[in-house]
Image (tube, grey):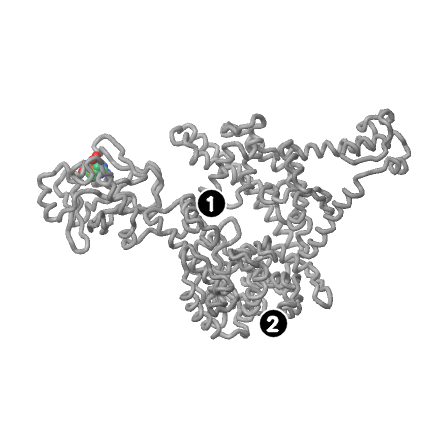
Amino acid sequence: MPKQSKKRSLRHNMVHCLKCNKPQKCISVHLRRVCMKNNMPEEQATELAEMKDSARLWILESRTWEYKEICEILPHKPSRIALLKAILQRGFLVNNPPHEGDLSDAPAPSSSPAASISEATSSTTAAVSSEPDSSSDPDAGPSDPTWQKDLPAVTTKVRTKMQAAGLYKKFSGDAEVIKDFKKYLSVDLDVTNCQQEVDNVARFLRYMQPTGDVPTLDFLKKSTDTRDFFQDLKNTDMTAATILNYIKNILHFVDYLRNRLALVATNSEFRNQCQAYKELVETLRKAIFKTNSKDSLSTRYQRFVDGTRSLRECQEVLRVAEKEFLHIFGMLINKDSAKVSAQQRTYYRYYLEAILVLRHFQRPGAVEGMSVYTVREWLDRKPVDNVRVIGISNHKTATTQLASFAISQEEEAWFQPYYKHIRPGFIGDLDSCDRFFTSAKGTAVSSVTNDLGRMHESQVANEICVLIYKVSNVTSQEVRRIAQTEVDSTFTTSQKEGVARRYMAQRYMAHTTAVAKTHYRMLDPASVVQTAVLLGKLSGCSPQRASQTDEASGQQEDRTFDSFIAAFPVTNDGRPPSQKQRTDAGFSPDRTFCDKWRGLQYVNRRRYLLSHFQMRKPAAGSVSRAIAKEGWQTNHPSADEVVKMWRPASRENVEGDKHVINSVDRQKWKGVAIKDFGGEKGLGVVATRQFARGDILCDYHGEVITAKKGNKKMPSINDQAGYMFFFTFREKHLCVDAQSDYCKCHPQLETVGRLINHSSKRPNVKPAACLLNINSKDTTVILFKALGDIKVDEELKFDYGVKRKSFRGEGLDLQWLEE
Ligand SMILES: C[S@@+](CC[C@H](N)C(=O)[O-])C[C@H]1O[C@@H](n2cnc3c(N)ncnc32)[C@H](O)[C@@H]1O
């Protein structure tokens, strides 16, 4: 272990995990994530207490040996002395040891058989611990490249092999380029939890450059070493999926080099090198991808050989556990909620999660991401007939995806006591918590998959007995696959077509990124319900089952919420009222309205942020800065969400946008520059940054005169025909006369827009007239908007309107207008 990290570990109170026998910096986290991830929290707590006691006991009693005891155990003196030396070396304390001279009687530890075993072990340990041991690190999970939540044993094996093969060494996170890469991921790309990606790249760079403290970019020239790297990863038995992850990370890193490092802009050789390297890695990726597909084929084949369960069998746990669940439900709604034990509360939550996964075929990520107050989620569930449709906007997976499903009123009635009685106890004072499902401490549910596993295997104690469900576990993926197969085989074509076509069932269940992109067709609540009814038939339960809730109560609630908002107006910088304020004002002490209040604030804040960026689609980094400037810590959209929600501004919005007004007034437009193309074409305008569709780039600046006046000028200005912009706006026929290089209002500035050249076949910007209030004067302005994405260095062109009747350039020598 390098000195630094050893020193750091020494500052922690290390406790040995008695399951894996490894010292752990944070034993509770370790148990929860690794050794006891399939146990109930209460079981974890008991083990934790025992492990801590054991650690204390070891210090109190076991670290110190009486030499006499050792003599009794090991009468053979040379072995004993060898053992004594070894244990002293390991920090044991020995009372009444033999004299110094006696110690030399024994051979050195390494020469005895026992010692050679210990040496072999310790040399392995030395190799293993030449890097910080992530298995003992509570944060090891996300930052470890071999981290697989469900496969701790394999993980450790792969990791050990990686360490032995020198693949685990990495550059320090303090190295400039690594630090900056991390910043690029987290700030520019808004990647949360990017540590694993950074570590993977730091390991890759270390492999490619075994010496030196500062990573260089020489790896771009090392194609053989790059191939070797992936081959070595493969040799550690790492799965193809994990190797593909490495590849993705390395490609991100190369992108980072291309985008971020200033030298790229000027050094075309370096840019080409990056491109060539990306192509090499892409080729390797294709080969590995094939292996990955083969792997998954063989898994599927294995499933086929093992036999497939029916959907009903997959949902078995919901049936066997229903009795206990309803028992808890009864206590909750009969005002006996105080009697519900902590374990029963957690169990209740597991059951609800299982309903969503097993009966509504939701991915665990969607269940984990379900939130209480954003516009589309729990509080905004939509009634359709007797059913409630819930939309989820934010998956807890790498890509944000959308899901929607319909629950019956009966199920809604089961969720409500969780929301009203269990969740508030879980989240306590955590006002900022927006998650619907939370752990007993109010933190995010770390893995719905694990919760499902516990439901299947666990022992649940009620006040009378311990229930043991011996139902074999099922994954969410398996349930969805089986449901899809049953849809295909059970329903007639007309049922599939008439009620919910196959693609709809897929959408209901799978909601992959591709589906998310087209989901708006699916989000129609009526079609969600239709699909849910169809799918419900497979397992014999329809979401339109009898209701236990009062339809009118929802409406009642909404009316009272209006008065709540009137009493506590939603502001961007305010906080929802405290429980005392709520009750003082005559409202219920429960959190429902507060959550709704926060939901509105969230939406207002998102709107407010979007209003900053009317002119141009923002980069995630700029949004993050805007959020930081507001000082909002919680209850705000992520930068990524704001970027995704951005839409080109309408004319009305543009007219009120102070950034646009300012830019026209000062004639300062960022991201556009004049370029001399030489020849007849002469000057033109190019983009110096990327633009997205709808972005405003600049205006066509000049003196606005009537079209009549402009027409009068035309015959005398043959050469300058291209600088007269005729247009009709709000029923007025006008013309911008931009003949002069320097206009009257900006005598020092050569304005840009007037120099944009023509193309009728491939225009990338479009002029649009609007009225801006500049210095208290209404001024008609022609703004150029991007028609699509525009790359750096791309020339801006707009259609001069040659083919239109209104074109005024007839008779002029304008051959280029054919373009
Ligand atoms: C508004 S100006 C554009 C700026 C102009 N290129 C310059 O150097 O000042 C219009 C004039 O540019 C030239 N032009 C515009 N589009 C062109 C094209 N696609 N190819 C060649 N010349 C073009 C024509 O001479 C036209 O009269």
Mark 1 Cα-neighbour bin, 10 Å: few <14, some 14–19, many ≥20: some
Residue 3 percent coordinates (x, y): 64, 31
Label 1 residue near ligand 1, CB within 8 Å = no
Q: Mark 1 points at which residue?
A: 190
Residue 229 percent coordinates (x, y): 58, 33
Say which amino acid is labelled 1. Answer: Asp
Q: Residue 335: which disc?
A: 2
Q: Is residue 310 visible?
A: no
- Would you say 649 lies left or right of 19 here? left
Residue 510 percent coordinates (x, y): 52, 56
Q: Distance between the residues labelled 1 and 2?
A: 45 Å
* Helix, strand or loop for disc 2: loop
Q: How many marks?
A: 2
Residue drawn where x is 72% and y is 51% of the image: 49
Q: Earlier in the sequence, mark 1 or mark 2?
A: 1
Q: Can residue 52 be seen in this view?
A: yes
- Foreground label between 1 and 2: 2
Front-most of residues 412 and 337: 337
Residue 263 percent coordinates (x, y): 41, 29
- Determine whether 540 is above or below 599 in the image: below
- Determine whether 689 is above or below 559 in the image: above
Where the N terminus falls, by quadrant? top right
Residue drawn where x is 49% and y is 72% of the image: 386
